[in-house]
Amino acid sequence: MAKISSPCEIGSVTDLLEIVFGEKKSAASTRCFRGQKNASWPVKPSVSRKKASDAESKMFSEIALDAPGDFASDKTMFEKLVRAQHYELPTRLLDVSLNPLVALFFASEAHVEDDKEHDGAIHLYDVQAARTKHADSDTLSLICNLARLTDDEKSTLKAASKDCSSEEAIDSFRNLPACKRLCQFVKMEKPYFENSVQPIDLRKYYLARPYRNNKRIIAQSGAFIASGLLEYQALETSSLSDRYKKILVRAGDKSKIRADLDKLGINGGSLFPEIVSAAKNINARYD
């Protein structure tokens, strides 16, 4: 279970760096950050906010049909979900950054709701080495291909995975039609894959490290937190990380922080290097 440090407030770039450097980190862990413009928002991936039946599988199927050429070079479901996220389609991947200044950029975005300016927040996680998966991970393939299953199939797997301490229970889980269908999807991208699924692996959070073949991933030092059958309800207290800290970004200081970040080359143009984003950032400077 993660060691939870007391939350704190910041009003400048320097404040953040002092906290980051002051928080001890084990050599084996990977520190990542999640920035959100509203501190009261839960830490959840965008697809979990959808309430329509089978929204996850249906949305991905539709974008894959509408833009097949865009996904032609992607060999795994993880790569496809990263691209879909890039196109702002809700997915089960939660964006994080290995760079605290990138997280600060997102946390310092102005946000007014109910006539009130809201503080932002940066969530700091020191992820254990055993919970870090690279793009070619079989476990990551299983988790990402859950996106292809129906809500009923995912619910079946979630219920069946709760108590799989015996070999008999594990074998029973592997023989579920939903598990066999999940494995078939993985086998399509990895022909060598065999159904040796460990149900417990589908009930964990992981830090997913993508291929650095995407301009935005590179610019944002991007990574993702992936969850199989869990619902991000206890991410902070889970065994994903050995340290967690919430850092509040004061609403009244957001504008100055954005200006200081711009001086350091952290702005919309650098973090979103596509031509449309660059043009938007340039245009804003001449208002």
Image (tube, rainbow, N blue to C red):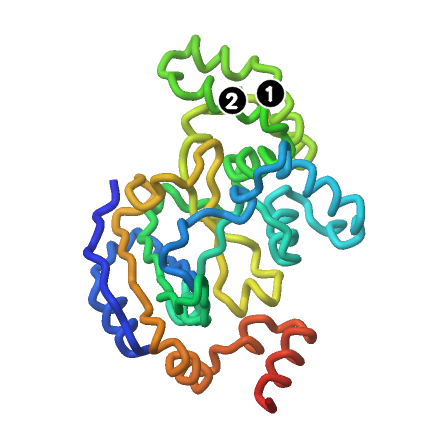
**Looking at the picture, how far across and down is residue 278, in whole percent?**
63, 78
Q: Locate the N terminus by quadrant.
A: top left
**Is residue 4 placed above or below 9 in the rendered structure?**
above
Label 2: which residue?
Answer: 157
Label 1: which residue?
Answer: 178
Residue occupying the far top of the picture: 168
**Is residue 200 placed above or below 113 in the rendered structure?**
above
Q: Nearer the viewer, residue 204 or 281?
A: 281
**Is residue 166 placed above or below 276 in the rendered structure?**
above
Whole-angstrom CA distance, mark 1 to mark 2, is 7 Å
State the SS at label 2: helix
Asked whether the beta carbons under mark 1 and mark 2 sit within 8 Å of each other, the answer is: yes
| Left or right for 177, reference 227 | right
Say the numbered circle drawn on residue 2.
Answer: none
What is the three-letter code of the residue carrying label 2? Leu
**Looking at the picture, how far across and down is residue 193, in whole percent?**
60, 28
**Looking at the picture, how far across and down is residue 48, in whole percent?**
52, 42
Q: Residue at x 52, y 40 (%)?
A: 137
The image quadrant of residue 259 is bottom left
Density class for disc 2 (Cα within 10 Å; few <14, some 14-19, many ≥20) is: many
State the SS at label 1: helix
What is the three-letter code of the residue carrying label 1? Ala
